[in-house]
Image (cartoon, helix red, strand yellow):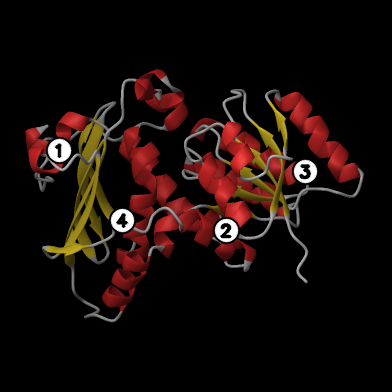
């Protein structure tokens, strides 16, 4: 019988934390400790009521160290904390002699990846990033279709992601570009990873719009021309979508053909954990390209001409 793995979770009160709890439960493993400065973590009772919980990092650190010294060290540290803390929490996981599973974006800057690679090389543990779209059946099917299609074909792609957020969003760390990386980083990084995974490296990256609520631009990839638009502003959602009651809308078209991937998201964290536990997780180098892209987007000047996503002109 396979021995169950023990996990700790940093960022247990966050929006995405229950998906990590569910993934640990679904894979037959155990959450033994959790940390968050906020104590609104009653959801733990639905998964691991016996897990020890801490609101202070120092006490959590001491507890994890005692587990390690008693021969009951963690196998994995899962990280769902605010983006700007990922780097420090990844380092903590490695120092605790545990593998690390980190939410996207792995870090905010490309040089953070370089530093983590050096630290990882000094241990026998690995850092894994949740790049869940690489496991979505519709996206895998699209990748296979492109790989098996004409090798010299350049595709025309439109990416649209509208996911409205309330006023709380801009009061929280997510509204602070120094902590979240801004909207393109916070809600776009895994889409950019998916696009480059399928269509290749970025040859040109043009930004047409980038403010606290929305961002849009144009990529020229090795095998695609991509117009993209992201927003957390409900008013940016077209009326016909608002009339359905939906507050989120995802769309990818390839040469005008819609790729259906609106569903199938709720179990992707479980699939990601399965993938990692099978020894197939996505590591630092897989995460690097998307980190470079979002850093580049934050650094670029806005260009108001060129091949723009249709929704940019209405925003």
Say which residue appears at 29% left-offset and 81% top-offset.
Answer: 148
Q: From where the camera sits, is residue 42 visible?
A: yes
Circle 2 Cα neighbour tier, 10 Å, few/some/many (<14 / 14–19 / ≥20): many
For disc 2, the marked residue is: 273
> Counting residues from the N terminus, which is met first, the one under dot 2 or under dot 4?
4
Q: CA distance from mark 2 to mark 4?
A: 29 Å
Q: Position of residue 237 (x, y in %)?
A: 16, 37
For disc 4, the marked residue is: 202
Q: CA distance from mark 4 to mark 1?
A: 33 Å
For disc 1, the marked residue is: 242
> Counting residues from the N terminus, which is met first, the one under dot 1 or under dot 2?
1
Q: Quadrant of the N terminus?
A: bottom right
Q: CA distance from mark 1 to mark 3?
A: 47 Å
Tell me the mark number nearer the camera, choosing from 4 and 1.
Answer: 1
Q: Quadrant of the C terminus?
A: top left
Say which residue appears at 43% left-offset and 46% top-offset.
Answer: 291
Q: Position of residue 202 (x, y in %)?
A: 31, 56
For disc 3, the marked residue is: 96
Q: From where the camera sits, is residue 102 visible?
A: no
Q: Position of residue 171 (x, y in %)?
A: 39, 18
Instruction: Describe the element under mark 4 as helix, strand or loop.
Output: strand
> Counting residues from the N terminus, which is met first, the one under dot 3 or under dot 2?
3
Look at the picture and state if 119 lies above or below 199.
above
Q: Which mark is residue 163?
A: none
> Counting residues from the N terminus, which is met first, the one under dot 4 or under dot 1?
4
């Amino acid at each position: 019988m396979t021995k169950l793995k023990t996990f700790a979770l940093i960022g247990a009160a966050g929006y995405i934390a229950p998906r990590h709890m569910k993934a640990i439960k679904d894979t037959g493993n155990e959450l033994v400790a959790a940390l968050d400065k906020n104590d609104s973590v009653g959801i733990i009772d639905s998964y691991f009521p016996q897990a020890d919980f801490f609101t202070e990092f120092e006490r959590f650190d001491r507890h994890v160290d005692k587990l390690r010294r008693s021969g009951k060290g963690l196998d994995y540290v899962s990280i769902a904390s605010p983006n700007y803390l990922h780097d420090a929490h990844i380092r903590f996981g490695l120092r605790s002699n545990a593998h690390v599973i980190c939410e996207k974006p792995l870090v905010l800057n490309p040089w953070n990846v370089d530093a983590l690679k050096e630290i990882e090389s000094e241990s026998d543990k690995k850092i894994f990033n949740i790049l869940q779209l690489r496991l979505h059946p519709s996206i895998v099917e699209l990748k296979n279709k492109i790989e098996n299609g004409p090798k010299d074909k350049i595709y025309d792609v439109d990416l649209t992601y509208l996911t409205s957020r309330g006023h709380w969003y801009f009061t929280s760390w997510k509204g602070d570009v120094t902590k979240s990386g801004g909207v393109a980083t916070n809600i776009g990084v895994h889409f950019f990873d998916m696009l480059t995974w399928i269509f290749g490296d970025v040859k040109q990256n043009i930004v047409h719009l980038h403010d606290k609520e929305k961002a849009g631009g144009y990529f020229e990839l090795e095998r695609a021309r991509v117009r993209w638009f992201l927003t957390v502003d409900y008013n940016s959602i077209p009326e016909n979508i608002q009339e359905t009651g939906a507050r989120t809308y995802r769309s990818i078209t390839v040469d005008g053909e819609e790729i259906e991937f609106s569903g199938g998201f709720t179990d992707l964290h479980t699939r990601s954990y399965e993938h990692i536990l099978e020894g197939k997780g996505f590591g630092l180098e897989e995460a690097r390209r998307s980190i470079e892209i979002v850093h580049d987007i934050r650094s670029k000047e806005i260009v108001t001409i060129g091949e723009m996503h249709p929704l940019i002109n209405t925003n």
